[in-house]
Amino acid sequence: MMSDAVRETLDRYYAALKAGDEAGLRGVVTEDIEVHYPAPEGLLPWAGDWTGFEGFRAFLSALGDHLVIDRVEPLAIHLAGDTVITVLKGEWTVKANGRTVRTETVNMFTLRDGRIARYQVFSDTAALGLGLGRLAA
C-alpha cells in the first residue's frame, strides 16, 4: 500500500514533467538528484548518468529533443522502504521520423525527505533504438 505522501510526490513529479514545469520539478526533486538510464553505448542520446538539477534538466532536454510522450499508463506501483517502482506502458513519437514506439518501462525512484533523490529508468532500449532508426529490425 502506497502512502498518500508518496503518491502525492509521484503525482506532482509526473504532472510537472508533463507540463514542462521547471519550478514544479525543482520542488519535487532534490538538488543533488541522480538519473541513471542504462542503454548500449551510443544507442539512445539521453542514456547515461546525470547528476544534480542541471544534469536532470539536461537529461530531460535530451529526451525531449528526440521524443514526444503521447501516452503513459501506469500498470503497477510497488513500494519498498524509500524506493518506489512503477511499471508503465507508454507510447512515444520519434520527432525525427514520426515513428511510434510502444514499450513498457520501469521507473525506480529513491525518495529522501519527500523528494526524489534518484531516478532510474529501465526501458526497452531495442524498441527505442528501432524507433530512432539506430537499429535495423
Image: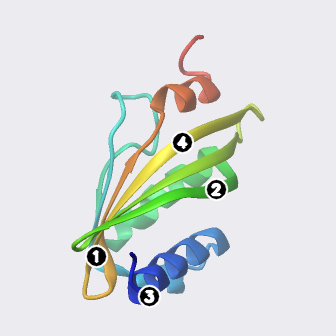
Q: CA distance from mark 4 to mark 1?
A: 22 Å
Q: Which corner quadrant of the image does residue 51 belong to? A: bottom left
Q: Nearer the viewer, residue 69 or 31?
A: 69
Q: Which corner quadrant of the image does residue 6 belong to? A: bottom left
Residue extending farthest top: 137
Q: CA distance from mark 4 to mark 3?
A: 25 Å
User: Reading the chain from its start, which is encountered first: label 1 or label 3?
Assistant: 3
Numbered label attached to residue 4: 3
Does the residue at mark 4 contact the one at mark 1 (Cβ under 8 Å)?
no
Q: CA distance from mark 1 to mark 3?
A: 14 Å
Q: CA distance from mark 3 to mark 2?
A: 21 Å
Looking at the rendered structure, the kind of residue marked 4 is: Glu
> Which residue corresponds to mark 1?
111
On the image, the x and y values in percent for residue 24 come to 52, 85
Looking at the rendered structure, the kind of residue marked 3 is: Asp
Name the mark nearer the viewer: 3 or 2: 3
Looking at the rendered structure, the kind of residue marked 2 is: Val
User: Reading the chain from its start, which is encountered first: label 1 or label 2?
Assistant: 2
Q: CA distance from mark 4 to mark 2?
A: 9 Å
Looking at the rendered structure, the kind of residue marked 1 is: Leu
Which quadrant holds the C terminus? top right
User: Reading the chain from its start, which is encountered first: label 3 or label 2?
Assistant: 3
Left or right of 107 on screen, residue 92 = right
Q: Nearer the viewer, residue 45 or 5?
A: 5
On the image, the x and y values in percent for residue 45 come to 46, 39
Residue in the picture at 69% in, 51% down = 68
Q: Circle 2 sits in a helix, a strand or a loop, which is it?
A: strand
Q: CA distance from mark 1 to mark 2?
A: 22 Å
Q: Which corner quadrant of the image does residue 47 belong to? A: top left
Q: Nearer the viewer, residue 5 or 91?
A: 5
Numbered label attached to residue 72: 2
